[in-house]
Amino acid sequence: MIARWSAELESDTSPPSRGWTDLPCPLCSGWESDPVREVAETHPEGRSPRQFLIVRCRTCGHRYLNPRPLTDAWLPISTDRREPEPDRTARSTIGSSIAAIAEPRVLSFDSACGIWLREVLPPLAKLDVRTAAVRPGHYDLAIDWYRLERHEEPAEELRLAYRALAPGGALLLAATLPQGWGEGHFGSAWVGDDAPGRISHFAASHLAMAVQAAGLRFERATVLGQPALWQASAERCLGWKRLWRYCWLAAMASWLARQFHSAEGMLLLARKPG
Ligand SMILES: [Zn+2]
């Protein structure tokens, strides 16, 4: 498989802005990897979907998309995907992480979270959305909501979170988990792959190691459901798998996956030592 991809890369005579690029592991910068599986482009926008490859880093075991397209239209941080809103677990974790602070200062790494964050945060909270200049050592809570997996340099994003947090401040990370029931059930129809926008396929252990490498103290991780992924994947299927497009069936499947530790997402809480 690697040989075929290499041949495609070598035979790609298109201008650099429309070609493919081979990139190192986003976590450890290692170049050696082994193929895991092929995934089809999730949103091909009318053309036939391109095929991508998820590989496993030989150095640290992290799974990521490689090689990746270098098109003018492709953005490392996709702006067209609606991330899932937080469920009860996530809302409770956000609330409890700043419960003792009267006027918490909160940083969101994504402007799209602003609407639901306003509902979750206490009325006196001051919410900033990440801009080019983040105030160092200022925030009681930083929220990275399904963004880190779409970042070309997640370690850099985590270092930025570390710098932005005040001592004792919390980082809340939401990420899509690989190898859950949904992914196994739907195979190539699974929209959770979200190729090529989702670059990293974090295992919980890799995410915990990454936050600790950035200087943060890992506190806990819990599973998160994403019934919308079941519904959207079912819409792409024929036959009985289309049943999961019904809201209550998707919610049931996602709930069962969580009970058996095969959920679609995870929520990780880390803290800057104070
Ligand atoms: Zn690696």
Image (spheres, helix red, strand yellow):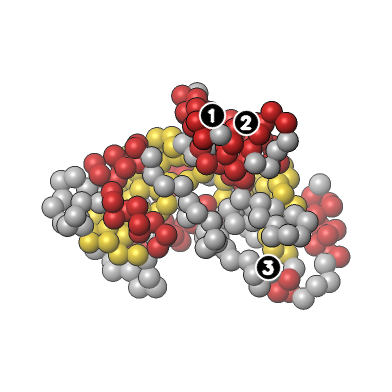
Decide which of 2, 65 is in the foreground and name it. 65
- Whether pointer 1 and pointer 3 mark residues with C-beta atoms closer than 8 Å, the reply is no
- Whether pointer 2 and pointer 3 mark residues with C-beta atoms closer than 8 Å, the reply is no
> With 274 as the anchor, is 17 left or right in this view?
right
Q: Residue at x 73, y 74 (%)?
A: 16
Q: Residue at x 38, y 70 (%)?
A: 131
Q: Is residue 269 above or below residue 16?
A: above
> With 62 as the anchor, is 15 left or right in this view?
right
The residue wearing badge 3 is 70
Give the CA separation, mark 1 to mark 2: 7 Å
Q: Residue at x 83, y 60 (%)?
A: 8
Amino acid of disc 1: Leu
- Is label 3 within 8 A of ligand 1 (CB to nearest ligand atom)? no
Task: Return the mark for residue 249.
Answer: 1
Q: Classify mark 2: residues with Cα within 10 Å, few (<14), some (14-19) or many (20+).
A: some
| Label 1: element kind | helix
Toward which corner of the image does residue 229 lie, by quadrant? top right
Mark nearer the viewer, 1 or 3: 1
